Image: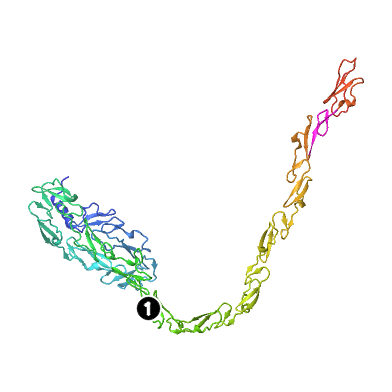
Amino acid sequence: MQPPSLLLLLLLLCVSVVITRGLLCETFPEPCANGGTCLSLSLGQGTCQCAPGFLGETCQFPDPCQNAQLCQNGGSCQALLPAPLGPPSSPSPLAPNFSCTCLPGFTGERCQAQIEDPCPPSFCSKRGHCHIQASGRPQCSCMPGWTGEQCQLRDFCSANPCVNGGVCLATYPQIQCRCPPGFEGHACERDVNECFQDPGPCPKGTSCHNTLGSFQCLCPVGREGPRCELRAGPCPPRGCSNGGTCQLMPGKDSTFHLCLCPPGFIGPDCEVNPDNCVNHQCQNGGTCQDGLDTYTCLCPETWTGWDCSKDVDECEAQGPPRCRNGGTCQNSAGSFHCVCVSGWGGTSCEENLDDCIAATCAPGSTCIDRVGSFSCLCPPGRTGLLCHLEDMCLSQPCHGDAQCSTNPLTGSTLCLCQPGYSGPTCHQDLDECLMAQQGPSPCEHGGSCLNTPGSFNCLCPPGYTGSRCEADHNECLSQPCHPGSTCLDLLATFHCLCPPGLEGQLCEVETNECASDPCLNHAGCHDLLNGFQCICLPGFAGTRCEEDIDECSSSPCANGGQCQDQPGAFHCKCLPGFEGPRCQTEVDECLSDPCPVGASCLDLPGVFFCLCPSGFTELAEYLIPFGLGQSSLAGV
């Protein structure tokens, strides 16, 4: 790869240095946002070719017309770029707007409304003539100086107002000329004298010569380049100042080196930080603070914004209200003022004005200042707002305990009657019982009304009490129920809640629990207070004698007898040779004389033996089975 020619490098350097307000494609990496492509124009001026869906000088805005639903009914969308509000180095903070151009027959901000007449009087914005085409669609023939489908746009650029190569931009309702480097003004009509800039474009030790739209630096020996920025010789060991990058530039007769400066620094060695506050736009007393390739406006407390042009609304600021005591805050440019309510004054309505200064209290009275007003303290015998009237209440025109007051405007008396009296002077007794015939009775629950002077009495029916018979009489206060029971107060009566074992209206009757035969198995019942006791027959147990006792559990049968349990009893099945209810009696088998004559009978449990007399050699054993009643003889 061949090294770049000196002429090309000088051209790039000239662009990066001279065009301070333009777009520099080669110097700054990716100056176009959102995938835009930077295209270099003449004199190093650059422009951004934006990717679909983005627009703006650096493609920084999303195109609002990408939303196909913005303009309805076939309307076409046109993006409107905002005018820049910030310094030259900062992008516009506003988002682009859009405008819809509607098809014939539709109108509205988004072409959402249909119109019946395709050529209404306002279709061509009163700046052209509307006629119907063969297709049935209306078409506007605009007057000179106007354009657009409905002649709604002023064609400011048709007269080519921008000179010196300026590009006319229709930023409705006005135009903007995009001037090429070296020219300025509303129509790019003024040549910029770069040599008068501070600092100038040419370094110290050189001469600056202004040209139309540009300038020329006259370099001394050993310096070359549009700004004499090329120095003879290799890069110095220390490099360039302020982070600049040194680059070798081969020339015709010798080698030069060039310092590529970072943003915010210029000069052959990047040693100069230009004062960006020279042409600052700080307004309303804002102080410019220089920075690297930019500046900051330090605004007074009543202004804000990047250039201190936005008024601070002190009335909406956080903290205590600016205006006190009900005053209304009204904002103004760079300040505010308070509109105070009556009786208050001062910058913040903090002063309570003395209303007694202009008061007209009658002589002898005392003026008392209040908030936004005053009052007159009258001496005895005087009344009224200004104590200018005679007090007619001194003659005591009102009856009894009625309260007398005076009209503060006319001085006439007014008697405020006590309950039960009426009339101008409260002398008339009010018959509350007679009034009950025309409305609800003052006595409730059927009570009888008896009128009295200034009042009335109520004769209450049984069960009610109170001055109007409004309260239910609590019959339980006399404790009518039997001790241990609970009294429940009801409307004009009561009810006794009896505990178990008591009954009756007053719970005075003891309940006979034996009346329901609660005991089982023929047991006897003994009535108790709030209960009963069952007297069980032998063989039964339990509260109600409901349990059959197992008499066999105690083994009542003797001599091996087998016990059989029965309801309330038991039965013993005896072994042979025993008898009795419990098999406790042994059977005497010898009572039946089972032995032969002459032999003796020997009774034993369950058996007997015959003892033979002399002459007999054998002892015969006779077994008498239980229940046979006789014995069997076995071998004599």
What residue occupies the far left of the structure in this picture?
221
Residue type of the residue flagged with mark 1:
Cys
Quadrant position of the C terminus in the picture = top right
Q: Please, what secondary structure does the residue beneath circle 1 have?
A: helix
Using the image, determine if residue 587 lies above or below residue 110.
Answer: above
Residue 585 is a magenta residue: yes
The colour scheme used to paint the residues is rainbow
Label 1 sits on residue: 356
Quarter of the rendering containing residue 301:
bottom left
Using the image, determine if residue 589 lies above or below residue 369.
Answer: above
Quadrant position of the N terminus in the picture = top left
- Would residue 347 be found to the left or right of residue 540 on screen? left
**Other residues around mark 1 within 10 Å, as few (<14) / some (14–19) / many (≥20):** some
Using the image, determine if residue 243 lies above or below residue 438.
Answer: above
Residue 475 is a magenta residue: no
- Residue segment shown in magenta: 569-587
- Would residue 535 be found to the left or right of residue 114 on screen? right
Relative depth, front residue between 36 and 591:
591
Relative depth, front residue between 429 and 5:
429
